Image: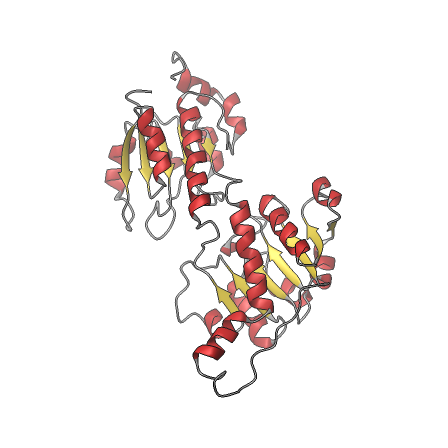
Amino acid sequence: MKNKKVIVLGRLKSCFFETMAKKNIQIQQWDSRTAIPEEQLRQWLSGAEGLILGRGSGGRKKLTVNGQLLEMGPFLKVVAQDLAGYDNVTVRDCTDAGIPFGNAAGANAESVAEEAMGLVYMTARRMIEAWNFVRDGRWAAYAVPPEGVNLMGRTAGIVGIGAIGQAFARRAEASGMHIIYHARTVHPDAEGHGWHWRDMDRLLAESDVIVSATPLTPATHQMWNRSCFQKMKDTAFFINVGRGGCVKTEDLTEALLSGSLAGAALDVVDPEPIPPDHPLLRTGRCIVLPHMGSMTEETLSEMSRETAENVLEGLKGKPLPGIVNPEVYGTEQFKNKWAGEGEND
């Protein structure tokens, strides 16, 4: 793969760059907290065969990949992102341009599920409040600490029973919780574990803890809104480890302030980053983390490794292990990109 050039926007772990170096692939990297200037991006892409989006690829926001950007890279053979989500990528535009797009879909499931379970414990047992109770000297003053609730015997309702949802379900079940879930269709693997499908209204009515693990799509945009929160128990806790845009933040704030929801814990939020004076943070009933479900050494390394595999296969014209748009391989645009080119080892 000598003389192949790829553009890296953002940060990846060292294993990615080591893999590229072994294959003599040239790297141009933009690793700044600000977005790359458009003219520089255009210049870099003009001769690149790969575009890789790491963390911080667009400064404070992820770089948007669409037809306009892809036109800057007439020789692009592959686009890869070391994240599971890809709401910043217009997949159809990649397909129309004959460019396979790959992500690191399964690498973060266990770490995100661990965090989700931690958020359930923190919320149900009011651990942040308890820490503030100690820090502020109220324990020393013999005040009564905050009371939480047990999880044993309660029901966890999971919306989105993919890899993250299933990994969370195993952890919740180990804590003695009953598991129900909602997805577009009944999931045989989930049913085999004794986890049972519910329609959305029934799940909301039965659940003591509701966990959202859905991607952001037109169908899921702001799906968690006033209507949903009003159907939940007023003792329920809402956990979001999917995407911030799936929640209508002002409706969640309203539900917490009115007492129609006992508490919430979010790894993802809309907007990101959330301003420190945002009304949601003033409810006293919501924990917000800085989108860190994947932020472990092991998970980040695995995501970078999977991204490297996507790039290597993409530069050879072979199917990406993490392909998002497999239909691209049947397009004339893809075939034309590889016309007259052989595979490169």
Indicate whether 148 appears above or below 13: below
Residue at point 67%, 58% (across, down)? 156
211 left or right of 294? right
Indicate whether 130 appears above or below 342: below
Residue 133: image location, x then y, percent: 49, 79
Number of on-image labels = 0
Residue 233: image location, x then y, percent: 69, 68
342 left or right of 139? left
The answer to whether residue 217 is seen in the rendering is no
Name the image quarter holding residue 147.
bottom right
Observer-nearest of 217 and 83: 83
Residue 139: image location, x then y, percent: 50, 83
Residue at point 39%, 69% (across, down)? 276
Identify the image quadrant of the C terminus. Answer: top left
Indicate whether 46 appears above or below 293: above
96 left or right of 36? right
Observer-nearest of 142 and 76: 142
Residue 103: image location, x then y, percent: 47, 37
**Which coloring applies here?**
secondary structure
Identify the image quadrant of the N terminus. Answer: top left
The answer to whether residue 293 is seen in the rendering is yes
Residue at point 53%, 40% (across, down)? 106
